Each structure stands twice: as C-alpha cells, then as structure tokens.
Amino acid sequence: MTLIDISPVIDATISVWPGDTPFVRTINSDMHDGANLTLSDIRTSLHVGAHADAPSHYLAGGPDIAERCLDYYYLGQCVVVHIDIARGERITPDHIANKIEDICASRVLFRTGTFPDPRHWNTDFASLSPEVVDDLYHHGVRLIGIDTPSVDPFDSKALEAHHAFARNDMAMLEGLVLDGVEEGEYELIALPLRIKGGDASPVRAVLRTL
Ligand SMILES: [Zn+2]
C-alpha cells in the first residue's frame, strides 16, 4: 500500500479565489532568534488548497463543516477518473458515459488538468454540470472531488453544481492535486477540521492504493 498526497503545499504563495483572504503565517516566537520555542498563527480563507466545502457555504441554513458526517471523507472506496475536457467547460454526463459503469464507489475524484498550478490562478478551469452531479448521486456517489478551485465555473453566480450537491446532501472536495494520479480505485482520506460555523475547511487529502 502506498499513500499518494493529493494536497498542494500551503504557504504564502498559494493562490486563493480573487478577493478572498490569502494565506498568511505569522511567526510570533522563533527558536532561530533564541526563543525557547517556535510559535506561529495563520490567517486564511477556509477555501485554501485542498478543502471541503460545507453546505452552509452555498445553502442558507445548511450545516457547517463541524456538523458534517465524517463518513463522507474518511477511508472509503474512491475512484479517480480522468476527464478530457477543454478549459472552461463543465463535465457533463456525456464525458463519463463510457466510464460510469466503472464507478463502483461512493466517492469520485475528477482529474481535468485545467488548473495546473495552485500558485498561478487561472479563471478558465473546468467544473461540473448539475446533471453529472445528479447522475452520480443516483449511481450511489456521495462525494465528488475535483482538481480545480470550484465545482462551478469561475464566473458562475447561480452556482448550479453547488446546488445539486445541496439537494442531494453530497460532499465535495475542491483544489485537489491529481497530477500523475492514475485512473482507478483507491481509498480516500480527507478529513476536514472541526471548525464550528465553518463554511469550509482545508483537508489533508490522500489516496491509499489498494
Ligand atoms: Zn470551496
């Protein structure tokens, strides 16, 4: 068994959604300067790097990240699917028509390659159609992850895919790094922090080979 880390390194150079709070780590006490210990704090958008959105991010009155069932995120069967898609497009049921029968897990991660560098923001990343979210739900899927910053297009205000997650009570992971990850079956571990009221949480997402 091998662990594959599918989380980007988080430091001041990681890009966050334009206008959102960037990641800043402040060192308050430093052993390099003679202190008896090193101590730091961070300020950041909760949507930094690989992260789980809570329903409260896109559904008024929806549960926050601390209230979410951990079964979504912890140690379960997961299928990685490569999608050949143009920049800026939504993944539709057609894109997975010949792969859906291979998706025999309740978690699916899509590798699109359309947000290649977490340190350089591009707005034309691929996203999900609400139809593919609904189809996967009916197929038994409960978590969908993607290697882009959002399951909806950059300029979407209606957030149709987010709302498909809400109506199906599904979980999402955004900002994954799936470069070099082969298509196939794995186990996923991507636990969010128990942040009361949190609209999201960074996760350390890893895949375990079977
Ligand atoms: Zn998010």
Image (spheres, helix red, strand yellow):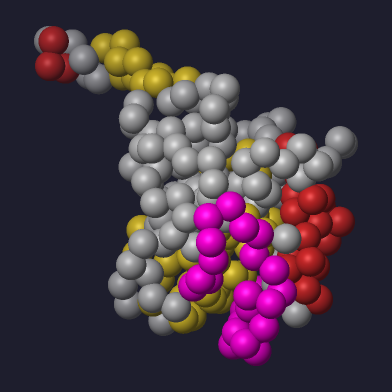
Q: Is residue 97 above or below residue 42?
A: below
| Residue 131 falls within the magenta-colored stretch | no
Where, quadrant-wise, is the N terminus in this rendering? Answer: bottom left
Q: Quadrant of residue 206?
A: bottom left
Q: Is residue 111 above or below residue 193?
A: below
Identify the residue at image location x=40%, y=43%.
Answer: 118
Identify the residue at image location x=41%, y=81%.
Answer: 210
| Residue 96 falls within the magenta-colored stretch | yes
Picture coordinates of residue 72, whole percent (x, y): 65, 61
Residue 148 visible in the current orientation: yes
Residue situated in front as seen by the camera: 146 or 54: 146
Residue 10 visible in the current orientation: no
Picture coordinates of residue 195, whole percent (x, y): 62, 34
Identify the residue at image location x=36%, y=37%.
Answer: 119
Name the magenta segment's main secondary structure. Answer: loop
Residue situated in front as seen by the camera: 42 or 32: 42
Q: Is residue 179 above or below residue 51?
A: below
Q: Quadrant of residue 97?
A: bottom right
Left or right position of 167 against 46? right
Left or right position of 64 against 98? right
Identify the residue at image location x=62%, y=41%.
Answer: 154
Picture coordinates of residue 155, whole percent (x, y): 67, 38
Total numbered badges shown on the rendered structure: 0
Q: Which residues are magenta?
A: 82-106
Q: Is residue 139 above or below residue 151?
A: below
Picture coordinates of residue 134, whole percent (x, y): 80, 67
